Amino acid sequence: MPELSLNLDLLASLWIIAVQLMASAFCAGAETALTGASRPRMHQLAQEGDRRAIIVKHLQEEREKVIGALLLGNNLANIGASAIATSLLIQVFGDAGVAYATVVMTALVLIFSEVMPKTYAINHADAVSLALARPTRVVVAVLTPLVMAVRALVRAVLKAFGASLPDDLRIGTTEEELRGVIDLHAGPEPEVKHERAMLRGILDLDEVTVAQVMTHRRNVVTVDAGDPPRAIVEQVLASGLARVPLTHGQPDNIVGVLATATLMREVMARGRDLAGLDVQAIAEKPWFIPESTTLYDQLQAFRQSDQRQALVVDEYGALMGVVSLSDILEEIIGDIGAPHPAAADSPLPGVRPANDGSYVIEGAVTLRDLNRAFDWGLPQEAAATIAGLVLREARLIPGVGQVFAFHGFRFEILRRQRNQITAVRVTPPKPVEA
């Protein structure tokens, strides 16, 4: 009978150890799966009514509590299994059983309770998190009181040493995480590169101002209301624009915006008699906006208005340029009038690649377009164009042939018209080999 009792005790102990190792594996796998599961996918499944995804989504939102409960359960199972194994092996081998128990339990815990479940969970995070959603919720609910007690003790100890933790440690999907996901978006080029640029463009709408995308006043086509009506009609048609600012006397004196369609309807109604045509009477009221307006705010303003063009002014009210709805849309989808990048010799208007790896760039090309087209990191804070960046960094008006190096790039002045840089050869830094 003693031998039978010993065998039963041995089997019971082994069974308890096995159960505790499985509990440890469950906690380790659940923690890894919930951490690695796709939050967007869980959100989408939850929206479709998947109850398990709803549970996973809730658990991810309570990440600190969940991880604390799973870690607590994992440690309780590992320590309990190790304690029973040590007691059992001491009975069999005496004091040497401590060493045997250490070796055996380390191997069992490492292989079956840590590496194996975590490896599987990280490679099947979504599926595992959905499969373990309900039991994980039960474990978290049972262990939460202990977790809260441990948390309070940890905060008290940290406070005693002058450290503190924020009250809310939830981790949400931030803009930085979204940008990271976009950067990791991979696939055949150049389609994926264009997709990445579009997604970044959407995120940048509230950071980029209209001053960075507008047509500069130097390139704005205007017509003077004092010119003869026939001359005005010819100028508007020759511009090829849908809307042309209407001035009176001085270039900065904008009195309206002349819509080409409205003008042509008036011309058709009058036949060839343009003598009495009052362009100022049919012009739209000018819409002035500050240069600090973000693209997001202006896009919302365009949606609430029937106008599709705005005049950008500085803090003194002087005209800086013109921004249209198409300018904002091009910041998201790229140049509407340009061919697909894969079918063009140059990925950007005003940029011509050279055989030596450099680029001949017109001075008016914007830094934002260059950064998006070539994944460069040229600073956009203090200058809008490549010519403006050179002037800012050089702190002088350079002559043709001068060479500068900053931000890892080489800049050679190719052409200059008066005080304006019209062409620059830019040599980017060589890519770092992995």
Image (cartoon, rainbow, N blue to C red):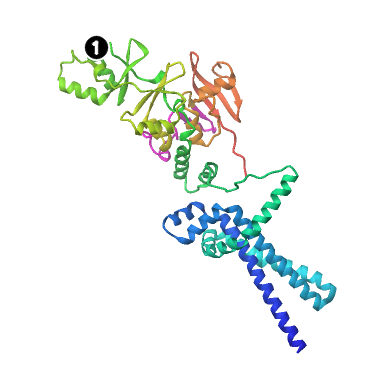
Query: Is residue 122 visible in the rendered structure shown here?
Result: no
Residue 239 position in % (x across, y down): 31, 22
Query: Is residue 415 visible in the rendered structure shown here?
Result: yes
Question: Taking 342 as reference, is 27 left or right?
Answer: right
The residue drawn where x is 60% and y is 47% is 169
Q: Tag 1's secondary structure?
A: loop
Residue 216 position in % (x across, y down): 42, 21
The residue drawn where x is 37% and y is 13% is 251
- Magenta span contains residue 329: no
Task: Identify the main secondary structure in magenta.
Answer: loop
The residue drawn where x is 80% and y is 78% is 92
- In what quadrant of the picture does the N terminus appear? bottom right
Residue range of the region highlighted in magenta in the rendering: 335-360
Question: Taking 429 as reference, is 2 left or right?
Answer: right
Residue 155 position in % (x across, y down): 69, 49
Question: Residue placed farthest to the bottom in the image?
Answer: 1
Write down the quadrant of residue 97 in the picture.
bottom right
Find disc 1 in the rendering and name its residue.
Answer: 228
Question: Residue placed farthest to the right in the image?
Answer: 95
Up/down of 304 relative to 117, above or below: above
- In what quadrant of the picture does the C terminus appear? top right
Up/down of 116 relative to 239, above or below: below
Question: Taking 407 as reference, is 301 left or right?
Answer: left
